[in-house]
Structure formats: C-alpha cells, structure tokens
Image (cartoon, helix red, strand yellow):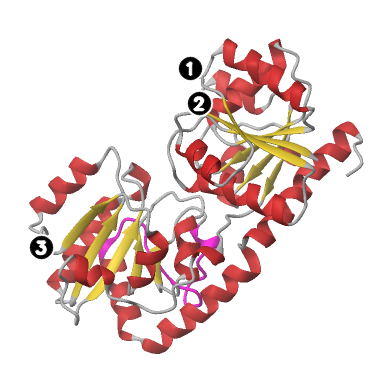
Amino acid sequence: MRLIQVTVSKVWRGHEQKIIYLYEAFKEYGYVEEQWIICPSDSAIFEIAIKKGMNVIPLNNKSEYDFSYAKKFSKIAKELNADLVFIHNSQSHTLTVLSSLFFGLKLPLVLCRTLIKRVDTNILRKWKYNYSGIKKIICVSYPVVNILKHAVKDHSKLCVVGSVTDIDKFTKAQKTGILHKQYNISSDYKVIGNIAAFTGFKDHRTWINTVAELVKRGVKAKYILIGEGSLENQIRNQISDLGLEDEIILTGFRKDIPEVLPEFDLFLFTSNNEPTGGVLLESYACRVPIVAANAGGIPEVVIDNQTGLLAEVGNPISFADKVEQMLNDKTLQENCILNGRKYLIENFTKEVIAIKMINELNKVLHKDNNIEI
C-alpha cells in the first residue's frame, strides 16, 4: 500500500501524536510499501516528522474551502501514485472531498474520527460525511460511532480502532523527585496531576472543585496541571476565587511528559466528553493509578475497580471520594497498576493498533479497487 496521511491541524495533541505513531508502526512492521504525511509547513507535526526523518510534504491551506489547496493535493497524490488517503481532521476532510469532487482525486478516502460531537447540525458537514468517496470512518471509540450514526446513513462505513500509545517512550521505572524539587513540594506530600489542553470538555472546573474538596478534607497533596489553552485565564480565576493558589501548580506546556508523568502519585482526569483519553494509556505505561470520569469512551479504557476508578461526571464529591479511596488502599493501587499495564499491552500498543488500522485500510482497497496487498 502507498499511503497518504493528511491533516491541516497546526496544534500538537493526541490525534497528531497518533499520526506519528501510526507512521512509525506501519514502517516498523512493513505494513506499507511507501507512505507520506501531508500537513502545513508551520505545524507541530511537520516539525516533528522532519526531525524523525519521515516522508513529510508541506501543504498550507488558507481556509477550509481552499480550492487551490484541493487542486495541489490532487496533483501531489497523482505524482506519488498513492493508493489511499487517510484523513485526520475536519478541515482536511473538507479539502480532500473538494479535491475529489473538482480536481480528479480518484483515491478512496478514509476518515479517522476522534471527537464525540454531533455533525448533523450543519447540512454541508452532514453531506461531507456521507460523500461517496469516503469509504470508511474509523472511530476511536463506540461513543464516537454512536454520535456519528445521527449523520452517517450507511452505518457499515463506521468501525472502531482504539487509541494508541508507545510504551517504549515511557521507560522511567522509579520516581526521582523532579517535580517535588522543581516546585518545592514537601517530600511527604503526594502529587496528584492532570495533563490536558485547557478546553471545555476537559472540565477543569470540576478538577479544581475536586481539589478544593480534597484540601478541605486535609489530604496531604499538591496538585499539578500540565497544559495550555484558551481557557487558561478562566482556570486561573477559579483557582484564585477558591484560594487555591498555594495548592495548584500550573506548569504550562511541557515536552518532558515521559519524565514527569511517572512522578504523579495519582492521575486525576475529569474530562466529561472524552473519546478515549490517550493520556490515560500513558498513565498505565508509567504505572500511575487513575481516577477518571465515567464519561464518553473512558470506560473503554478504564475498567472500574480493575485498572482504575471511575467517578460521577461533574461531581467533585464523587471524585474526591475516589481519590481518597485510591490513595488509602495500597492493594487497590497495586492491582490497578498491574492490570492497567496489562490492559494497555494487550489492547493499545503501537503493534496492536497498527495491525487493526492497516486491516481496515486494506479492506477498503480490496473492496473498492481490487488491489492486491
């Protein structure tokens, strides 16, 4: 297979990391003859792909309806003699459909969908999901499938291939106290943390309210938020209003997650509409116990009382209860750490997800083009 993965996203989050992971796995296991990433030249994924020596082609768009981009994309795909286009974000979905409609792109299109968000509220958006050139929509979890069923007429196009992480990135086996030292945290205090973009569905409001409840209960811990985003001022204001400036540490964006995540004594994840939560898989890899919201696709990643604890969505009392339960029960912690890592290895590694993903892509080629793989 000669595969193009395309995105016009400029940020660096879980989906962009997934593109890199899949490229690496497809190459490592020999699943493709050749592959390319097409993305903006000023994007984080372009910079990372270049550093890793990947086949990456810069292509910038001015808008979601950039006909010039669509024309150039078709030309590039023909020159590469590609077999299939794997689409990774909403704008690139629109642009590749335009390329197919107006500029002779004849390749089958496969969409990777990771958001739990209705797409049938807009006629054009709904139409592009039902466009005949979109042969398959690979979803990250069943809640994503269920939300798309409102828009997609042919449900047979929908399938699930879960999140992926690279356990080889997370090799740190013991705490070194780096966060305690960096932020002057007393050695007898636990570190409870979260890593997430400051966006609405991550529900940092509940996270901060949970911290307020835990402080009130006298839990000896400091609380670390790693991330950045449009809601940062709102988050800072809430912390200030609740008088938690000495309890919650905002680190901003960090590139050393494999170094700092293992320093957490507990990962507290309050997201209320999470497709899966790749950072939860990273917590498994780092042997960090989890308390997470019983929302979206999280229950497909966190099995309650086996690999972590699930709390009621938006309820800081429920989260605080689960945090105390986990911190105070060493046997529970050890079982969740052991079971979580086993669950990760069996279901969400690059090797496991890559073969599932390539099988779905190959099905498209066999069905639509009769290409021998």
Q: How many marks?
A: 3
330 in relation to 356, above or below:
below
Cβ–Cβ under 8 Å for marks 2 and 3: no
Front tag of 2 and 3: 3
197 relative to 292, above or below: above
For mark 2, what is the residue? 121
- State the image coordinates of residue 180 (x, y, percent, origin top left): 22, 72
Identity of the residue drawn at 25% across and 62% down: 224
Q: Amino acid at mark 1?
A: Ser
For image coordinates 80% across by 43% down, the residue present is 33
- The residue type indicated by label 3 comes to Asp
The answer to whether one can see residue 90 in this image is yes
The label shown at residue 218 is none
Q: Is residue 274 left or right of residue 108?
A: left
Mark 3 element type: loop
Q: Is residue 307 magenta?
A: yes
- Which quadrant of the view contains residue 2? top right
The magenta segment: 298-316
Label 2's element? loop
Query: Gap in Å between the C-alphas at discs 2 and 1?
Result: 21 Å
**Residue drawn at 65 percent across, 20 percent down:** 73
Which image quarter holds the C terminus? top right
Q: Residue 233 magenta-drawn?
A: no
Q: Which residue is mark 1?
A: 63
Q: Amino acid at mark 2?
A: Thr
